[in-house]
Image (cartoon, helix red, strand yellow):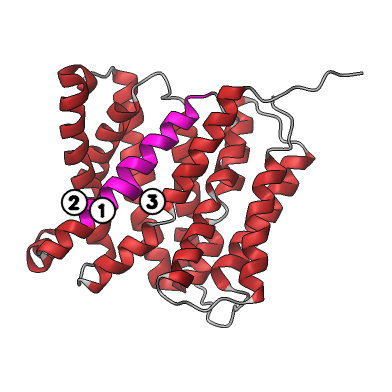
Amino acid sequence: MKQKIKMRPDQRKGYFMVLIAGCLWGTNGFFVSILGDLGVQSSTVAFLRLAVAAILLALIMLVMGGKKLFKIDKYGLLACLALGIFSQALFNYSYNEAIDHIGVAMACILAYTSPIFVCIMSRLFFKEKIGPVKIIALAVNIIGCILTVTGGNFTSIKFSVYGAGAAVLAGFLFALMTIISTTTTSYHPLTILFYSFVFGAVTLGVIARPWNAIVQAASLPLLLAVLGYCLIATVGSYFIYLRGLSKKLETSKVPVVTSVETVVATCIGIFVFSEAIGLVKLIGIGLVLASIVIMNMARPK
């Protein structure tokens, strides 16, 4: 009889931390909606998020550890470059392009291919086992996310090859963040976040050129909203996420756990913005939560 492999206490803590990170990411829509009402376009929001977060991180790092937290070797810098360009800047750009061409609903549906990409890459690069329990959890999770976002209403869905390609690319780039971040656990999370945000902000600055838009929208409410967005849904969420990954988690499980973001975002929409809720959305939320439980039933590697 085979001995059952139990999850280590530090792994449980790690999965809990990435769950909290997912909850914090769920506030993205809240802050983006506020900034949109203040007249800020999505590309400008993405730039401000990374640029201001990098400034805040620099101040935090100076207070916590001085110059030593800014030290990083060549591999760490290359990993940050990849994270900043691909999983921050180009992810935001491709996702916004997808929304412009095929709408929010279809863009969300195709971007939820992200857990599939993580599973495939974790198998290729980290030799993780992908058994039937993980496959079931992935299927339940994707269906749940789609139902939660659409509420079962697919009548407004648009399609174009370019838009669909951009959405799938966004899913892949988001998956890439999990894969690359898993290889950076030997570095301090603040160091990785700072350099990846700097590279991401520079890339978005070149692509979007948001300078005039920032000047036109500048106000105290904008400053407060951006600070809240950066502290809660950016610096806080990514720091907790990287700390969680450092607990030697199974990479293929992580995106399913963080998909609680969808549940939190939907609940904010319902209770804060008075969005309609129906049976299909409730079923979707139930499936997302069930998929997290199912995924953690898979035996640790």
In primary-sequence order, the first of circles 3 and 1 is: 3
Residues at discs 2 and 1 in contact (Cβ within 8 Å)? no
Mark 1 Cα shell of 10 Å, populated few (<14), some (14-19), many (≥20): some
Q: Position of residue 15 (x, y in %)?
A: 56, 35
Q: Quadrant of the C terminus?
A: top right
State which region is magenta.
226-247
Indicate which disc, 3 or 2, sits on the residue closer to the N terminus. 3
Q: Mark 3 to mark 2: distance in Å?
A: 14 Å
Mark number, residue 81 = none
Residue 93, visible in the rendered structure: yes
Residue named by callout 2 = 205
- C-alpha gap between disc 2 and disc 1: 21 Å
> Any magenta on residue 240?
yes
Asked which secondary structure carries label 3, the reply is helix
Disc assigned to residue 91: 3
Q: Which residue is tagged 1?
A: 228
What residue lies at 20% left-to-right and 32% top-to-bottom?
60
